[in-house]
Image (cartoon, coloured by chain):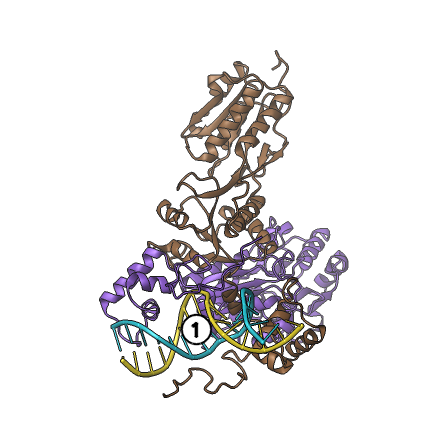
Chain colours: A purple, B brown, C yellow, D cyan
Amino acid sequence: MEEPRKRARPGRAPAPAGRTGRPRQAEVARLAGVSQATVSLVLADKRQGPAISEETRQKVLEAARSLGYVPDPAARRLAAARNDLLGVFSFTATFPTDVRHSYYPFLVGVEREAAERGYDLVLFTGSSTGGAGAGAPDALGRVRLADGCLFLGRHAPVQELRRLVADGFPVVHLGRRDEPEGLHWVGADYVSAAREVVGHLASLGHRRMVLVREDDEAPASTDRELGFLQGLEAVGQGDNPGAVFRSADPERDLTPERLRGWLADGVTAFVAEETDTGAAWRALRRAVADAGIDCPRDASLALLGSPPADLADGPEPTGFDIPRTRLGAAAVRMLAALVAGEEATEPLVACTFRPGATSGPPPAAGDH
Amino acid sequence: MEEPRKRARPGRAPAPAGRTGRPRQAEVARLAGVSQATVSLVLADKRQGPAISEETRQKVLEAARSLGYVPDPAARRLAAARNDLLGVFSFTATFPTDVRHSYYPFLVGVEREAAERGYDLVLFTGSSTGGAGAGAPDALGRVRLADGCLFLGRHAPVQELRRLVADGFPVVHLGRRDEPEGLHWVGADYVSAAREVVGHLASLGHRRMVLVREDDEAPASTDRELGFLQGLEAVGQGDNPGAVFRSADPERDLTPERLRGWLADGVTAFVAEETDTGAAWRALRRAVADAGIDCPRDASLALLGSPPADLADGPEPTGFDIPRTRLGAAAVRMLAALVAGEEATEPLVACTFRPGATSGPPPAAGDH
DNA sequence: TTGTATGCGTTATCAC
DNA sequence: GTGATAACGCATACAA
């Protein structure tokens, strides 16, 4: 049976050590021979507060150092509403067993930028393995321990996020997201990137192109399509209704025959969107191979993103890379701004164009 | 006597809303017509505390729900004298750009186990990019913000660790480590694992074996050698002085001639230790190839660990895998125990034997 | 069974 | 310059 802890220290003894065992400002004060408030002032290093004598200052600093004093984040947050901690919350495990699905590249940027700005990171072990506060209705509540929080993953519950946002708690979502309203996010500029890819193909001489995409309404998908169409428009191909091929199962529907039909119609370049599964790109590559088409001689291919792992060994696709690390950094920048009460920073991060080896000039008319 | 003006709410009105604008227990209490303490009790839903009438219970729950009450984690942790935070400190960036060198597999286990136990993680951006508390002499001081801390990487400064340990701050190092004294660690059981590999080779019929190792005094190296020797001992080969080949540069010193010499002497199996560089295994494979030896027909090979990235494509080596994920989990288990004031848990984690394809029965005497 | 009184460690505001 | 002292929001021993 555990000894029922005494209700704090009965007497007014100078508190040898708090419940936590960790030294507190009171002890630093005692050791330095000053008051606790003075310690707080010295450690806060305020510009405008009461000036403190250099001597006192040193005494306090020395005492704090020798005791290994570190402010309690909870108390700090409670009293001052800030503790220089930024939260990171993901709705799947932050470190999934399969590295491929991981947020790793983002975290590289997150860590770097946070360090740069003097923030430490709290990784909220979210709904991952069913631990901490898995399905609890206020699973997200814990993030309020930090000054603000970054959210990763698609499955963030709207209701809880809405609550945080409504309360004015600084929140940034990694990846574009329209709900709840008012949620801040940072994301890749797929529109510009897709447009640039089309522009590249056009500069090689291509005019008629087809975009292969899955049946998905995610912003990442619609943005790519938008950019693709803008790119076509820019080269005077904006009025071609068949320029977008949309299928719930491209690997089934994108047959070699269909491909040959397009080619016969004068299409010379094909663009695939990137998705989790990579189905569009896989379907495209397979159809090209099955149809015996030589790429990039007979047709050019481009991928709006990176290839899935199983196709990573093939020729480097023309397209763009998603700047995951920079996205992570941008998210932290925005979060830091919100925490400081400033305006949100620019949400869009530019993608990096990748020339690749799957595109070239279109075959001269009459070839093949 | 003049009434000292209150800082926050001037009157003693029942606090319509705190700084945060979010409802507090006091308001829930007011709405439910009970005291704040009762609200706390109801919401805590304790098993053993004072029982509360179902009616009150419902009133409180209803009030809390209608107000959208969400507990403040900072206040909660402050009052409970625990912040349920475990630190993770690495001396290189926790998320290095090159994923290969990363702590990723460990973090998988760390996250999982921490979540399981209701802890969140604080990532201290150690000496990484020069952020938070970069090269500061007390860079490690920050970790005291957590309830305990996990250290990754070889370069933990002994002095500062000693200080933390001396202060009774719960610290666990990932990887065996003898200094400072009293430091807790978890590590892979290389001794048993190496012994098991030798046992496997022996069971195939091998008797004379040679261990190729680098000139390194790290515990991970000496443990492997120890296990290797124990394994030999177990099959009556304990008195062979030439069983360990040690070189500062195995890729230079392990020549095909030397290999043939060993074979001529009756050695039928070769074991390489795993190191950062993978030099021992690389040297061994190259010498075998250069000498035109067929593995596993003419000689068996084993690797005490995993192959370096550049040799990952070769045949799977007989040997063992380091259970990195389980190591991470074990580290958290131990840290949690220390935080709870309990005894440290078992530091050794078993490796996983890997049959592989580089070993088989020794050639019959007289073959080749 | 419920209410009262305190304390958790910090910050911030005042008098001295 | 320095030291009381009052919150911050919640938990809990103890009285009622």
Q: Position of residue B336 (x, y in %)?
A: 54, 51
Residue A203 percent location from the top left of the image: 55, 66
| B34 relative to B154, above or below | below
Q: Viewer-proximal residue, B100 or A74?
A: A74
Residue B147 lies left or right of residue A291; in this view the side is left
Residue at 42 percent across and 82 percent down: it is: B7
Q: How many marks?
A: 1
Which residue, given by chain and number where applicable, does mark 1 sit on? A80
Identified at 26% across, 74% down, the residue is A51
Examine the rendering and report whether any part of residue B368 can be seen.
yes
Q: Is residue A116 left or right of residue D9?
A: left
Query: In the image, is residue A45 above or below residue A182?
Result: above
> Residue B52, located in which quarter of the rendered image?
bottom right
At label 1, counting other C-alpha atoms closer than 10 Å, the crowd grade (few under 14, some 14-19, many 20 or more) is few
Q: Examine the image and state in which quarter residue B364 appears.
A: top right
Q: Report the residue at 32% width, 55% height from top.
A: A66
* Subunit bearing disc 1: A
Q: Quadrant of the C terminus of chain A?
A: bottom right
Residue A360 visible in the displayed image: no
Question: Which amino acid does the dot numbered 1 rest on?
Answer: Ala
Q: Position of residue B197 (x, y in %)?
A: 58, 28
User: In this rendering, is residue A290 above or below B132?
Assistant: above
Q: Nearer the viewer, residue D3 or B121?
A: D3
Q: Quadrant of residue A337?
A: bottom left
Q: Residue at position x 55%, y 15% from top?
A: B266
Compare residues B34 and A187 and report the one nearer the observer.
Answer: B34
